[in-house]
Image (cartoon, grey):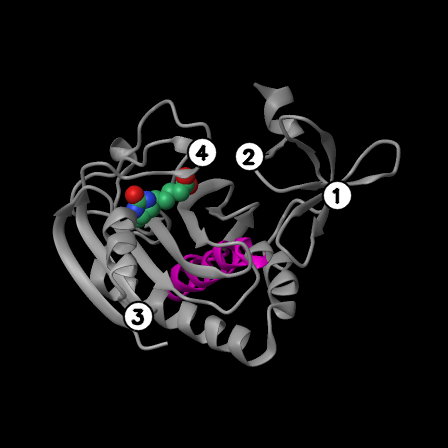
Amino acid sequence: MDEHLIICREVGSTQDLAREMALSGEPEGTAVMALTQTHGRGRMGRSWISPPGRNLALSVILRPTLAPSEAALLGLLTSIAVAETVESAGVPEAQLRWPNDVLVGGKKIAGILSEATVDEKHIEFVIVGVGLNVNSQEADFPKDLRTPATSVLRCTGVESDLEGMARSVLKNLNSLYRQVKKQGCGFITELWEQRWPHRGVRLIHERITGWGHGIDTNGALLLRTEDGRVERVTSGEVIPAHLIDAS
Ligand code: BTN
């Protein structure tokens, strides 16, 4: 895809702007970055709040020729690209939490919102949105976060340029996306699982508890339950049981 980055000072949500652009025919690879979002959106209907000018808010239009059942893989792919970006910025080890969170030392450094527009058989387009904590200080993070947060600055002690971060995410995403186009989605599972710390860890989902087993070829989380069955989880979030037991 040809990367084309549009930088805005303030928007409601880069997701919404990118969606409007996709609907009016903008090609894949077009990306929108904003210094401030007044109505940033997170997963599961939550809001995404970020101090003006410090962090990356980026949404990218993709037009993959994948089946709708494979759409979730693009969120996973984006989380790998973001993990690679933060590591190139000097963060030691970026891990992934299903479905799309990027964590460093158990703290969330980035969240990804992947929104697909599909008809019965095709994906029309997908907007992948990246909220990456770049130059946030400890005091910028709300006190009542479910998962503690961190930023590239907190991890490295160095401030980073937001546009440079956006371009790095786009470059990494583009190279992974090119691989998808060439050889299909098969490689994503393994690459994602290499950064996943929850294999064999007891995880709690709203309806099931089980041990992290892996992800399947459509990006669903697989949990092995006490009676040996493997359950698929396709929505919501999972929390390691030891974090709940400890609270
Ligand atoms: C999450 O962890 O809940 C996902 C957060 C995604 C936030 C990004 S910021 C850029 C893009 N625009 C939005 O309104 N949301 C995503």
Q: Nearer the viewer, residue 38 or 83?
A: 38
Question: What's the amino acid at mark 1?
Answer: Gly
Residue at image position (45%, 27%) is: 146
Earlier in the chain: of badge 2 and badge 3, it is 3
* Residue at numbered disc 4: 44
Q: Determine contact: label 4, label 2, CB under 8 Å.
A: yes
**Helix, strand or loop at mark 1:** loop
Q: Which mark is residue 69?
A: none
Q: How many marks?
A: 4
Q: Confirm whether the magenta stretch covers residue 92.
A: yes
Quadrant of the snapshot with the N terminus? bottom left
Callout 4: CB less than 8 Å from ligand 1: yes
Mark 3 nearby-residue class (10 Å; few <14, some 14–19, many ≥20): some
Q: Are marks 1 and 3 in contact (CB under 8 Å)?
A: no
Q: Are marks 1 and 2 in contact (CB under 8 Å)?
A: no
Residue type (three-letter) at the residue carrying disc 2: Gly
Q: Residues within 10 Å of mark 2 (few under 14, many from 20)?
A: few
Q: Is residue 160 visible?
A: no
**Quadrant of the rendering where the C terminus is positioned:** top right
Name the residue tied to disc 3.
27
Is 36 inside the magenta-drawn segment?
no
Q: Nearer the viewer, mark 1 or mark 3?
A: 3
Q: Which residues are magenta?
A: 70-93
Quarter location, residue 108: top left
Which amino acid type is marked by label 3? Pro
- The residue that mark 1 highlights is 200
Q: Which mark is residue 236?
A: 2
N-terminal label among 1 and 2: 1
- Is residue 80 toward the left or the right of residue 184 in the image? left
